[in-house]
Amino acid sequence: MLNLNKIIANGPKNTLRFINTPGLSHKGQWIPIYPNTEIDRFYVGDFSSANYTITVEYSSNKKETMQAMVCARPDQATVTVYAKTGIDDAIIRLSAEVNDSWFSLKASPADSAFTGAKLVFFANYVETINPLALPEPVSYIDSSSGGESGGYFPGGGSGTASDSFRTIAVSGQSSVIADSATDTLTLVGAGGITITTNPTSDTITFTGTGSDTLASVTARGSETDVAITVNNSITADSFVTNGTGTPSIVSDTSIDLDAGTSVKIVGGTLRLNSFTSTARDALVPANGDIIYNSTTNKFQGYANGSWVDLH
């Protein structure tokens, strides 16, 4: 039979003194971790803060341990990981929420490959000192540094970022400004663009699905097998083709080439469009136009209001 008198005794300031015992061992019921798994909850009327020691194992070779502090009020909570070490990759991420004055500490796999990892924890809780009272809703940014952090925004929902932006500005467009701390920014896909989200990896993916959009951009800035519609302008050092087929530039009206000195053909030949005399006469020419007349086999130019042979 365990004799506690041989293990613990009264210490100074009403503390417990452990006699010849180097520490405490803990092996609680482990919890499998999936996206937004609740690992602990308490009523904010009972406790205002807590300190957690958390150990996670995905396998005998992949494991990590961390210490996290949480603080909660009826409409907001924060979590900060202030100490963390592990073997191999990070396994989980922590977040904090409050719902109807119930605090919830949640864990999610840091990568989908770690889904189902096993977690155990023990905690020290600090009881609430003042009676509960709802505060005025305020915008919240967790300014803590050196570890993970998160916050609950009044009205429901949570965040896990240490920085946020109230205004999103796009050059030439009206800025998007948050109306309140609970306002939501909605991304809308259009023009052949679809948007997909992945809550587990915290990523947003934009994918082009139409022939009038740039489907993807490689690291070299090149793109193949896609039609591009440009409404304004393209600025580039050069346009290079390295595949099969003949590139074409199409316009419903005119195409203007504007060079500071001259327009040069530095490789290959320049081939003019070929017209029969009948097709030529159906054109609406302007002085300076040049064609090849396939009826007379002559290069012809339009000068002073009529077509003339150039040779």
Image (cartoon, rainbow, N blue to C red):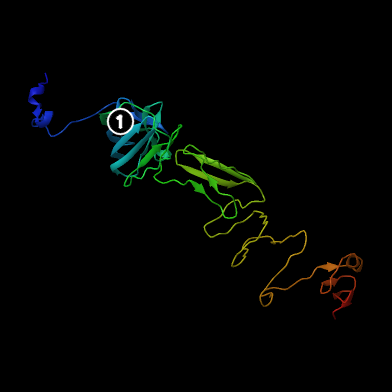
Camera-side residue: 131 or 47? 131
* Residue 29 image offset from top left, x and y in percent: 29, 26
* Residue 77 image offset from top left, x and y in percent: 36, 34
Camera-side residue: 228 or 75? 75
The N terminus, quarter of image: top left
Residue lying at 59% horizontally and 52% vertically, measured from the top left: 173
Residue lying at 66% horizontally and 58% vertically, measured from the top left: 232
Residue lying at 54% horizontally and 51% vertically, measured from the top left: 169
Residue lying at 87% horizontally and 66% vertically, measured from the top left: 284
Residue 122: quadrant of the picture: top left
Q: Residue furthest bottom?
A: 311
Query: With 253 as the anchor, is 213 left or right in this view?
Result: left
Amino acid type, mark 1 = Ser
The C terminus, quarter of image: bottom right
- For label 1, the residue is 48
Q: Is residue 241 above or below residue 35?
A: below
Residue 237: quadrant of the picture: bottom right
Residue at disc 1, secondary structure: strand
Query: With 263 as the anchor, is 41 left or right in this view?
Result: left
